[in-house]
Image (spheres, helix red, strand yellow):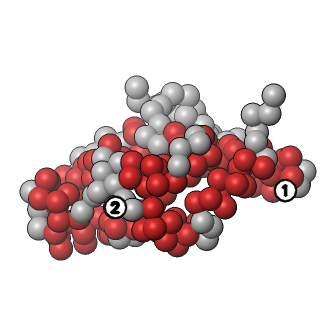
């Protein structure tokens, strides 16, 4: 379903009426952060900021899914994003992705960086870490099982990558959500 956008003035926020979320996990994580922030700090400023982040992510995901690409390079960029989203649980390698699309690795990586502003490797890692955050906060799977399900060869490499991206170990991240379980009964 393609999103439709309401008209906006300077006093109104423009939100999509319909759309497709290519990464609902990102929205869920932001919503959990908002709930945790409200319980912990009760700060309207922080809560407003997090609400803005949720709305911006919603808008960005819906706009991405609605774009009608007329240029082949832009279409390739969006196809790469989709491919990574669908194959994030695999051990993704840039040469293999480039070969899948029929391009030279260097050209492929350069094109991606031009459109994304980050390297393809960074994007793959960020996508995997978003899925890891979701799994750590929503399940009791062992960290090693989460690591293997995301294409990491072992839990140690996964933990190092997770710490590099988030600043926390996977167990510390999970513990933070378990202490403030938002679905208290």
Q: Residue at x 55, y 34 (%)?
A: 16
Q: In the rendered view of the protein, which quadrant contains the C terminus?
A: top right
Q: Nearer the viewer, residue 57 or 67?
A: 57
Q: In the rendered view of the protein, which quadrant contains the N terminus?
A: top left
The answer to whether residue 7 is above or below residue 170 is above
Whether residue 122 is visible here, answered yes or no, is yes
Provide the residue designation for mark 2. 153
Q: In the drawing, does residue 99 fall left or right of residue 7? A: left
Q: Nearer the viewer, residue 122 or 80?
A: 122
Q: Position of residue 90 (x, y in %)?
A: 30, 51
Q: Nearer the viewer, mark 1 or mark 2?
A: 2
Total numbered labels placed on residues in the image? 2
Q: Position of residue 120 (x, y in %)?
A: 32, 65
Q: Earlier in the sequence, mark 1 or mark 2?
A: 1
Q: Position of residue 67 (x, y in %)?
A: 36, 42
Rendered image: mark on residue 45? 1
- Disc 1 from disc 2: Cα separation: 42 Å
Residue extending furthest toward the right: 42
- Looking at the rendered structure, the secondary structure element under dot 2 is loop
Q: Residue at x 62, y 67 (%)?
A: 168
Q: In the drawing, does residue 52 fall left or right of residue 115? A: right
Q: Find residue 176 and report its image quarter.
A: bottom right
Q: Nearer the viewer, residue 32 or 51?
A: 32
Q: Residue at x 65, y 53 (%)?
A: 174
């Amino acid at each position: 379903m393609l999103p439709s956008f309401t008209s906006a003035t300077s006093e109104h926020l423009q939100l999509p009426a319909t759309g497709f979320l290519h990464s609902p996990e990102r929205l869920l994580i932001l919503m959990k952060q908002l709930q945790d922030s409200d319980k912990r700090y009760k700060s309207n400023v922080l809560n407003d900021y997090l609400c803005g982040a949720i709305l911006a992510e919603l808008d960005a995901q819906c706009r991405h899914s609605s774009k009608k690409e007329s240029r082949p390079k832009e279409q390739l960029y969006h196809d790469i994003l989709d491919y990574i989203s669908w194959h994030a649980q695999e051990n993704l390698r840039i040469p293999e992705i480039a070969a899948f699309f029929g391009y030279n690795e260097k050209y492929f990586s350069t094109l991606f960086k031009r459109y994304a502003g980050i390297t393809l490797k960074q994007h793959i890692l960020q996508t995997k870490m978003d899925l890891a955050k979701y799994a750590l906060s929503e399940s009791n799977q062992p960290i090693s099982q989460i690591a293997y399900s995301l294409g990491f060869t072992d839990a140690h490499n996964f933990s190092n990558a997770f710490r590099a991206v988030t600043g926390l170990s996977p167990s510390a991240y999970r513990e933070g959500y378990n202490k403030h379980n938002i679905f208290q009964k």
